[in-house]
Image: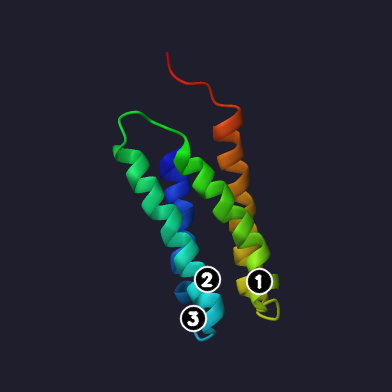
Amino acid sequence: MYWLTGFLGFLMAVAPFALGYNTHSTAMWTAVVLGLIVFVASIFEAYDVRKAKWEYWVAGVVGIVAVIAPFVFGFTALTIALWTMVILGVIMFVLAGYEVFFMQEPV
């Protein structure tokens, strides 16, 4: 499932440019940095032979940060940025939580 979290990270990183809120630097850099963190962690997970679950912990924490970032950094007035961060953050958090707590290791 690392490919799905990687895709979500990629979406978060390109969202400011695709959705047009790249003129607001705080919202743009928050989305780009958080998205790249998840994307890079997913790439490392893809090449990890042990298949540890650390990438999903990273994705879960980034998901929580993405949900609260618009409120902390004060870009709640940018509706598209707010909802992009909240929706992608919740999806990341749920997927990461499912992977960490409910998926069984292959035998």
Where residue 46 is drawn, which disc sits there?
none
Count the labels in the image.
3
Residue 3 appears at what percent x and percent y? 41, 43
What kind of residue is marked 3? Answer: Asn
**Is tag 3's residue or tag 2's residue first in the polypeptide sequence?**
3
Q: Nearer the viewer, mark 3 or mark 1?
A: 1
- Vertical placement of residue 60 versus 20, above or below: above
Residue 60 or residue 5, whichever sits in front: 60
Q: Is residue 56 visible?
A: yes
Residue found at the very far top of the displayed protein: 107
CA distance for labels 3 and 2: 11 Å
Answer with the quarter of the image where residue 78 lies.
bottom right
Compare residues 101 and 4 and report the one nearer the observer: 101
Q: Residue at x 47, y 35 (%)?
A: 53
At a point 61% along the width and 38% down the height, the residue shown is: 97
Marks 2 and 1, the one that precedes in the sequence: 2
Disc marking residue 70: 1
Residue 95 location, x and y as percent? Answer: 57, 41
Q: CA distance from mark 3 to mark 1?
A: 14 Å
Circle 2 residue:
30
Circle 3 residue: 22
Residue 10's spot in the image, x, y percent? 42, 59
- Determine the residue positioned at 56% across, 33% down: 100
Alpha-carbon neighbours of circle 1 within 10 Å: few (<14), some, or many (≥20)?
many
Q: Secondary structure at mark 3?
A: loop
Q: Amino acid at mark 1?
A: Pro
User: Mark 1 or mark 3, which is nearer the start of the sequence?
Assistant: 3
Q: Are marks 3 and 1 in contact (CB under 8 Å)?
A: no
Name the secondary structure under disc 2: helix
Task: Give the Cα separation between the discs numbered 2 and 1.
Answer: 9 Å
